[in-house]
Amino acid sequence: MYLINTSLDKNTAFKTIYQISRLYMPNTLFKYYSLTDDTSLNKQKLDTLLQQKVFMSNVKSLNDPFDSKAYFYRPEELKKYERLAIHDGKLIDDFAAYTKVCSFSTNGINSMPMWAHYANNHCGFCVSYDTKINWDLASCTFPVQYTSERIDITSVMDEQVKKALLELELQSKQGRKKIILDDLSLIFLTTYFCNIKHTSWSYENEFRCTIGNSTQIPSYMPAQPKEIYIGKNCKQTYIDKLTNIAKKLHIPIFKMYFDDLNNEFNLTAKKLQ
């Protein structure tokens, strides 16, 4: 087996993997929005839609408390390093703290569970986004992987510690006060780890836009909507507001219906304008 030992080789490998992953990016992604009794939050969502943006959430604020728990490392095995021994072998407490995410789905508009779970029982709306147009969004969006077993990344963390300590020693000898790790694998690992969930969530068919989390990075990502779909139980006041937004953005808008006299067990989208 050939092992990748240098940062340069790893960076090349990760870049190749990234380029290949772009070939499997769906042309259209869908995002479901709830509209609840929180009028202030509802207004924020509609304003964000009109501004052609999507909100990037902290992972800790997501609806799954076990998000970013699909992997773990054993701190006791890192105590062998003197610099980590005083910290009980802990290098990173929570990978999720370093990222912001925005969730999308490939399920489309005829997914009853998505309407029920993410558009508060069909009272909200769904927006489609063309990934061929939204380059910024698509460039940092990856498919979520689902697993029934947690992943032990102790060996990965051990390798990162070795590499960091080596660079610390080398660059300190050069008189550098700021240590720089030129290794894209750190970025890809953080992104990858935040895109793994338990198999019980696989029905979502989620694609997740993932960016770094810092005070310098904005909480919104540009995202030009393609179409708007209104839930069958949406209140008229929000139907009017969404219709007005669609008119301003010059995009189609649809209302979801269920035909009680049709033998097909699905939803139907009817164009409003």
Image (tube, rainbow, N blue to C red):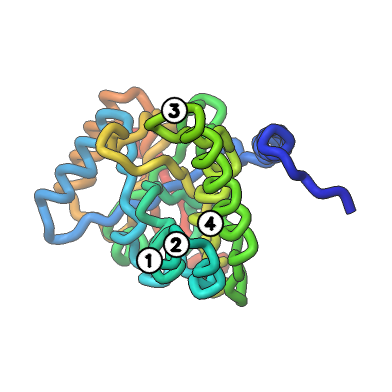
Asked if residue 147 lies left or right of residue 180, the reply is: right
Tags 3 and 1 touching, CB below 8 Å: no
Q: Residue 108: in sight, yes or no?
A: no
Give SS at disc 3: loop
Say which amino acid is labelled 1: His
Q: Position of residue 215 (x, y in %)?
A: 25, 37
Give how far apart the Cα atoms at labels 3 and 2 are. 23 Å
Q: Residues within 10 Å of mark 1 (few under 14, many from 20)?
A: few
Q: Position of residue 214 (x, y in %)?
A: 30, 40
Tags 2 and 1 touching, CB below 8 Å: yes
The numbered mark at residue 193 is 4
Relative vertical location of residue 26 with respect to residue 197 in this rendering, above or below: above
Q: Earlier in the sequence, mark 4 or mark 2?
A: 2
Tags 3 and 4 touching, CB below 8 Å: no
Give how far apart the Cα atoms at labels 4 and 2 are. 22 Å
Q: Earlier in the sequence, mark 3 or mark 1?
A: 1
Quarter-of-image position of residue 4: top right
Q: Position of residue 262 (x, y in %)?
A: 52, 65
Taking the spot 34% from the left edge, 43% from the top edge, the residue there is 213
Say which amino acid is labelled 3: Gly
Tags 4 and 1 touching, CB below 8 Å: no
Judge by depth and name the residue closer to the eye, 103 or 101: 101
Residue at numbered disc 2: 84
Give SS at disc 4: helix
Give how far apart the Cα atoms at labels 3 and 4 are. 34 Å
The numbered mark at residue 175 is 3
Say which amino acid is labelled 4: Phe
Given this view, does label 3 or label 1 mark the residue nearer the observer?
3
Asked if residue 48 lies left or right of residue 132, the reply is: left
Taking the spot 30% from the left edge, 36% from the top edge, the residue there is 220
Residue at numbered disc 1: 87
The outermost residue toward the front is 173
